[in-house]
Image: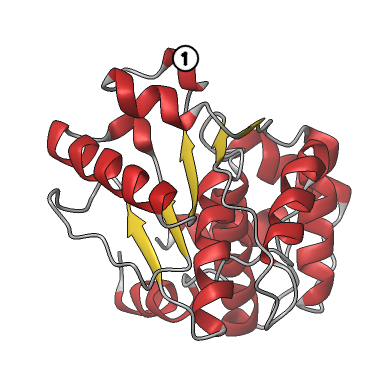
Amino acid sequence: MNAPMKQLVLDMALPTAPSLNNFFAGPNRDALSHLTLWLGEPGNPLRSPVSTYLWGDAGSGKSHLLQAMRAALTARNETVGWLDASGQGDLPFDERWTCVLMDDVHSYTLGQQHTAFTWFVNAQSQQIAVIASGSLPPADLKLRDDLRSRLGWGHVFGLKPLDEADRRAVLRHAALARGLALTDEVMDFMLHRFSRDLGSLMALLTLLDGYALQTKRAITIPLIKSMMDNA
């Protein structure tokens, strides 16, 4: 990658932080409404301690929603417990937490499963909600039995990836928010030549926006090809 393009990637590749407001629900409106209702307004302590589990394929938005909940609670100066597959096991539970968030539970090591189960038990005894995500329904998770059963006790939402029409709507909305116009031809090219995962498409749009600004050109198929040739 040459220096100008490398700098462009560094400058422009940072995605917008996940939030409930920038989650395009599509077929997953029930899950979004549930989390929005649970979060409530600032200063509202009336939150159900019943657990919530989100599951779905990569790109369905489950990690986006967990990160959005973490950001929203942190912005209100509330503390949360966070565990994902990249973290270490044997982490202590903190009774000051408002919520326990567990991402990508399907990939947990035995140590992480032990921590998750311990957190779950402590959270339930303290009436603290657990919100978790994984790639499979609770019954199909390859986890220790006591953790798997607890993940299925509360609210369970199966998330579906956006279909092509929804992806087009998201791309068009995100482009308009940047003051950009994407033709149907350009969107066809983006959807059929690159990963259809929404996160990847948003990252691609960010790069295209930066490259178009740098080259002072409109976003066209030749511009996309030029950007990739210079990557």
Dot 1 corresponds to which residue?
139
- Is there any visible trace of residue 102 in the rendered image? no
Place of residue 65 in the rendered image (x, y in percent of width and height, measured from the top left) = 59, 54
Which residue is pictured at 57% across the width and 51% down the height? Answer: 49
Q: Quadrant of the C terminus?
A: bottom left
In the rendered view, would you say 125 is above or below 195? below
Q: Is residue 211 left or right of residue 216?
A: left
Q: Is residue 223 left or right of residue 176?
A: left
**Residue flagged by tag 1: what amino acid is it?**
Ala
Where is residue 87 shown, x and y percent of the image? 21, 53
| Quarter residue 100 falls in | bottom left
Extreme-front residue of the structure? 125
Q: Is residue 197 above or below residue 3?
A: above
193, above or below 136, in the image: below
Quadrant location of the N terminus in the rendered image: bottom left
Depth check: give the residue in front, 190 or 223.
Answer: 190
Name the residue at 84% across, 71% down: 176
